[in-house]
Image (cartoon, grey):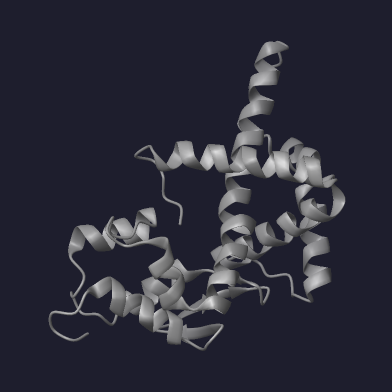
Amino acid sequence: MDSGRDWCEALLEAVGQWTMADEEYNGRTYSYLLLGEAFDWLLLAERLCSELDGAIPGEAKEDLLFRGKLPESFTAERFRVLIGHSKHRAFLNYWYGVVIEEALQLKTEEELRKQHHARGFPDTDDLTEEVFAKLYEGGREELFRDFLKETYKKRRASRSLSDLKEFTYWLFKRRVRIWDPARVASDTRKGLVRLGELRSSDCYLGS
């Protein structure tokens, strides 16, 4: 990066110029474009930061990679311009299809847990099956098999973070397909509200 140049401008410009959907780098697989539609820009930012050799201040780098936060002076419009129209559209797919979807799953689990308590049911750590049944009309493993079949992916012994993100994006698309628009909009708003609550707390680690 040029001396004196704003690191955020340089990073986002590099993001905008990037052409690979995935790559192998230093023994790690990076999948930036999930199912050919959803752009995980923070994963690419993490990859590019490894080449900036200390040009990003430590706290700013931590805010970016662990909290998804850009400098306060950086506007959403400047972000859109620097990464370009196509990548920004794919970023929005990721934002709604992965980040908001994860927040909706969390909110749904919290609602179900509250219902269990109100009815006097014994507490349980895992409500995943109930969450999936309510949001996607199926069990998690059953839906994961459908995901593998529909996307022509091979079942592997372990699931990478990118695999799970792609599955979440696939679930988002399924939810949009199976429910009426009013319910889809209501659930999406629920996810947005829950994400806003997480972002205002110290525990938020989303993008």
**Residue 28 image offset from top left, x and y in percent:** 46, 78
Q: Nearer the viewer, residue 97 or 66?
A: 97
**Residue 72 image offset from top left, x and y in percent:** 28, 55
Residue at image location 35% in from the left, 56% down from the top: 69
Residue 109: image quadrant is top right
Q: Is residue 140 left or right of residue 158?
A: right
Residue at image location 66% in from the left, 45% down from the top: 188
Residue 43: image quadrant is bottom left
Residue 116: image quadrant is top right
Q: Nearer the viewer, residue 155 or 13?
A: 13
Is residue 6 positioned above or below 184 on the image?
below
Task: Give the residue at the far front of this rendering.
Answer: 77
Residue 151 visible in the shown view: yes
Q: Is residue 13 left or right of residue 182?
A: left
Q: Is residue 150 left or right of residue 113?
A: right
Looking at the rendered image, the quarter that the N terminus falls into is bottom left
Looking at the rendered image, the quarter that the C terminus falls into is bottom left
**Residue 24 image offset from top left, x and y in percent:** 49, 85
Q: Is residue 144 left or right of residue 15?
A: right
Residue 126 visible in the shown view: no
Disc tally is 0
Is residue 206 positioned above or below 104 on the image?
below
Task: Give the residue at the far left of this rendering.
Answer: 4
**Residue 165 image offset from top left, x and y in percent:** 60, 61
Residue at image location 20% in from the left, 79% down from the top: 53
Is residue 187 positioned above or below 68 on the image?
above
Q: Nearer the viewer, residue 86 or 143?
A: 86
